[in-house]
Image (tube, rainbow, N blue to C red):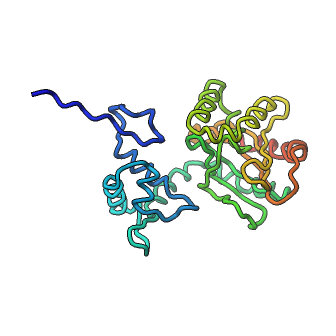
Amino acid sequence: MPKLETPPNRAPASLQEYAGDKQFATTLARGMELLRCFTPEQAVLGNKDLSQKLKLPAATISRLTYTLMCMGYLMPTEHYGKYQLGSAVISLGHPLLAQFTLRRQARPLMLELAEATGGSISIGIRDRLAILYIETVRSFDKRIYPLEVGTSHSMAGTAIGRAYLMSCRPPEREALLNQIQVKTPQDWHRFGPKLTENLLQYPKYGCCVSVGEVFPDVQAVAVPLGRIDRGELAAINCSFQGRALDEVWLRERIAPQLQALARQLT
């Protein structure tokens, strides 16, 4: 009797580099990628939505959502067949945030700078090809765009993402830039020229900026923090919304204050 061939490992589309890797738990990866589909903008999703996003059969999605709901990572909504994240997701994040003891030291200093500049101060680490905020403070609450612990933003398009890249060793930085070009070509097309310009100008200015690139009325300046708790590379930014865009002002007036704060934290 001929030996049946083992079907290929169907890794999620976002993790195709692991396709065929026998050590890679495909079902687990699919479940985790399913949870990542939920965002503040799309907080409620159904099996059909998830099937389209993950490019997986409806039957597979149904098993995943049922299992995650049984475990508390998803919960049903008042709309039949729709789900939202469950409270168990929070229990995963809290132990991680608790390990970043720098947050407690940084918060009063960040608030002082936020009040002095009228901006928002955030510390970010890498989440794949995005920057994830692990601490953020602001001088006032009038904000349209998301600015909370746990929110993530483009690495290529943001000042904090570019400052993170400058905290990397050259081989790591080159690898991340290659990944951005291959995995998020839309980001590279949109932000690549300014990203490259920022990295080239970093030795001169000691900071990175993003001026109206992600949101038309948001500008920011950022500097690397180097390695913080858990050996994670991090960066810190100061962002402003709703004031005249001014790259020179960011570099000459705000960057020195942010650099002084970074020195205090490291």
- What is the tally of numbered marks visible in this picture? 0
Residue at coordinates 35% horizontally, 31% vertically from top-left?
Answer: 20
In terms of image quadrants, where is residue 129?
A: top right
Name the one closer to the observer, 258 or 39: 39
129 relative position to 189: left or right: left
In terms of image quadrants, where is residue 197?
A: top right
* Residue 38 locus on image (x, y percent): 50, 58
* Residue 128 locus on image (x, y percent): 55, 41
109 relative position to 116: left or right: left
Figure check: 65 above or below 141 = above
Residue lying furthest bottom: 78
Residue at coordinates 41% horizontally, 59% vertically from top-left?
Answer: 48
Residue at coordinates 56% horizontally, 37% vertically from top-left?
Answer: 183
Name the one closer to the observer, 79 or 170: 79
173 relative position to 117: left or right: left
Residue at coordinates 22% horizontally, 30% vertically from top-left?
Answer: 5
53 relative position to 134: left or right: left
Q: Quadrant of the C terminus?
A: top right
In terms of image quadrants, where is residue 81?
A: bottom left
Residue lying furthest left: 1
* Residue 40 locus on image (x, y percent): 57, 61
* Residue 243 locus on image (x, y percent): 86, 58
Q: Quadrant of the N terminus?
A: top left
Residue lying furthest top: 171
